[in-house]
Image (cartoon, rainbow, N blue to C red):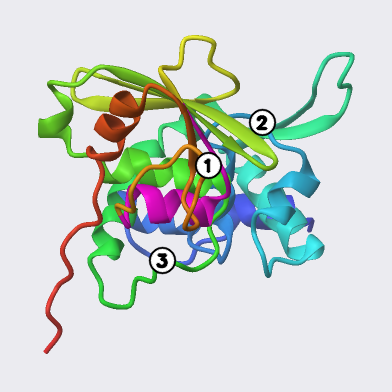
Amino acid sequence: MTEREKSSTKRWYDDACGTALALEFVGERWSLLIMRELMFGPRRFGEIKANLPGVSANVLTQRLEGLEANGIVTRYRLPSPANVPVYDLTDWGRESDSVIRDLGRWAARSPRHDPMLFMSPASAMMSLKTLIDHDRARTERVTVAFHFPADAFIARVADGDVTITRGEAGDAEATFTGDTMAMRHTVYGKHPLTRDGAGGTLAVTGDMAAAQGFVDLFALPPKITVG
């Protein structure tokens, strides 16, 4: 039996709860993080692997096969001129967006959460969707761009929420440039904004007031007290 067939037929729990079934779909190591990496659009195998340090090519192949067998991930070839095979979430797979956000916010309250560990660009953007202050965002409307070394995103705040897409934004009021560590220093560490990224922050071009207004919408949640 192939990995695809095993992943679509095996049962871990004798339990009718949807949560138990969800764990059968995404409970294996790396599965949910693969879905996170695909949340903003299709990625090549090598791009997924580069943004998941520690996963082997063999395990990544197995997880992708399992997710595909269960209708969460789809595989296809981009049209010319790219003409490369990619993986993407299905429409149903993309519905996990709110699940990943809620789970991330819940876990970020643990004292064990270390915001300075490795973070991929997709993970950095998912953190914005997770940690926006919805009440404060109801009075804001702003579009900003993020330029990471190997990726680019557009973040639009409106109606109390933020929508994020991969790509370039010609209408961005401000553009942040740097890596994901600089993003965390800037957005969550609240280091002063600079034009040149001094002090390990993101460099900012465009409207500084718009950039600051955007940054002010995000914060890490308070930690729980253990014991």
Circle 2: residue type:
Pro
CA gap, disc 3 to disc 2?
Answer: 31 Å
User: What residue is disc 2 on?
Assistant: 42
- Residue 120 % position (x, y): 57, 52
Where is residue 3 drawn, in percent x and y? 74, 57
Image coordinates of residue 90 in percent, x first then y, are 56, 29
The residue stretch that appears in magenta:
175-189
Callout 3 environment at 10 Å: few (<14), some (14 to 19), or many (20+)?
A: few
Which mark is drawn over residue 26? none
- Residue under label 1, please give it: 196
Secondary structure at numbered mark 3: loop
- Residue 17 is at least partly visible in this image: no
For marks 2 and 1, the one nearer the N-term is 2
Q: Nearer the viewer, mark 3 or mark 2?
A: 2
Front-most of residues 157 and 12: 157
**With 213 as the anchor, is 53 left or right in this view?**
right
Disc 3, disc 1: CB below 8 Å?
A: no
Q: What element carries label 2?
A: loop
Mark closer to the chain start, 3 or 2: 3
- Tag 3 and tag 2, C-beta contact below 8 Å: no
Residue matched to label 3: 13
Q: Residue placed at 45% from the left, 16% from the top? A: 172
Residue 78 image position (x, y, % from top left): 80, 21
Q: Nearer the viewer, mark 2 or mark 1?
A: 1
**Closer to us: mark 3 or mark 1?**
1
